[in-house]
Image (cartoon, rainbow, N blue to C red):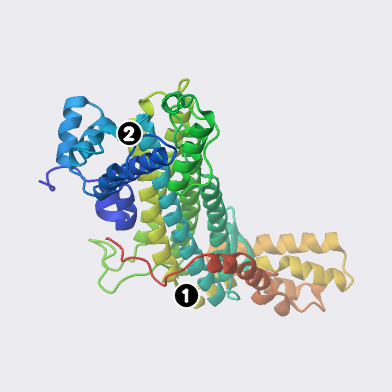
Amino acid sequence: MSHETYENPLISRYASTAMSRLFGAQHKHSTWRRLWVALAEAEAELGLPVTAAQIEELRKHVDKIDFAAAAKYERQLRHDVMAHVHAYGDQCPTAKPIIHLGATSCFVTDNADLMILREALELVAQRLAAVIDALGKFATDYRDLPTLGFTHLQPAQPTTVGRRACLWAYDLALDLAEIEHRLSTLCARSTKGTTGTQASFLQLFDGDHNKVGRLEQLVAQKMGFSATYTVTGQTYPRKVDAQIVDSLSGIAASAHKAATDLRILAHRKELEEPFEKDQIGSSAMAYKRNPMRSERICGLARFAMSLQSSTSATLATQWMERTLDDSANRRLVIPQAFLAIDAVLILYQNVASGLVVYPEVIARNLREELPFMATENILMAAVSAGGDRQDLHERIRQHSQAAAAEVKEHGRTNDLVDRLQKDSAFTGVDVDSAIDASSLTGRSVQQVDEFLSEVVEPIRQRYTLQATTEELRV
């Protein structure tokens, strides 16, 4: 039957088992039950008639969920939380009277979501750090290999292969800082009640505001949170979802940019992603080595970026204290945003760890443009030798246009250097030294070293990094 119905490819093809399990039914509903246990424990500690035997009974069945019974109850009751309350109660008859005591549905749904979001963000942070580490190693290996730079996708001042990798890694380092910020500011909703006023809990504790406040703190601590959102409606602020998915969208944009660069460099035959021994690039053109992993990164990243608007729209349409049109949308958007980013980062680490560099092609492509790139150095050297800056600039402009015409109109080699050497205005200028590629990359090498020391190494220290990721699913 699994071959007759649609399967989400994020689960079946792309994302890791670890991320998929975080958003699976077992983990979700076990988390609900842990929250019911935490609530019962806290209520007992604060003097409500909840017994140790009832709590122990609840604990024993946290992971033993009868999903068939819950589904049957939901068909009857049309309410997912109450379906699971009844299914849990059937397994825990002694504790049944106190399950969900004083709580609203969002006590379990939203608090569980926050706990799962925390776990998912931690996994994303780990994956980001692994990609940054891989790019850092690549940057170290090619820190001083000159390559043609590009602005407007047109040849520009040379950089190095390692420095370009630092651009990709720095985008991810900024993304990691954002994910870490989201983690550090994530709070529990805890026991806020039906519309956030805690009225039901105030009634349970006979108007004792201190105990209601203490209950909120205790449950949050049992959830592993040190703080709660100060005020909420029926849900935790949907602003939080928007901020988190914004952060994931940022990772997607960073990955898309780098993967696009790699696809362009593959087109230039300067750089290639890993290509396996038996891998087929095209069903028709047997010679091809298509950058399919980078292309997949772009496709998945584009999907993740498209989800950003949903969480903003959900936030914008949360009428008053809450409206339920967030539920179906969040069930789709939030898990799939994480699954897509998980898949993107697994692919990205695989690519970054196995990039193939072709120095001779890089050098050839650089040589073709190098005379143009060196004109600023030649100009400054000629001025230092006593020349008129404006006159020299005009001569270089004319020679450059003529050399470009030779290349573009006649397919000949770039003869700009010969033209300048024959021009008496540049007598005494060592043109050959001026077009040495290594002298045109500025502080590229030093910037790579500084970036690795100041940005990459602290990330390596904060995270336990593995040499390889899980094997790619396809």
What residue is at 87 percent from the left and 74 percent from the top? 385
Q: In this orientation, does residue 398 appear? A: yes
Q: Element under label 1?
A: loop
| Alpha-carbon span between mark 2 and mark 1 | 63 Å
What residue is at 39 percent from the left and 45 percent from the top? 337
Q: In this orientation, does residue 242 appear? A: no
Residue 58 in percent (x, y) is at 27, 44
Residue toward you, 274 or 123: 123
Hey, what amino acid is under mark 1? Tyr
Q: Is residue 159 above or below residue 87?
A: below
Residue toward you, 268 or 106: 106
Q: How many marks?
A: 2
Q: Is residue 429 above or below residue 134?
A: below
User: What residue is shown with label 1?
Assistant: 358
Q: Residues within 10 Å of mark 1 (few under 14, many from 20)?
A: few
Outermost residue on the right side: it is 386
Q: Which mark is residue 100?
A: 2
Q: Nearer the viewer, mark 2 or mark 1?
A: 2
Q: Which mark is residue 135?
A: none
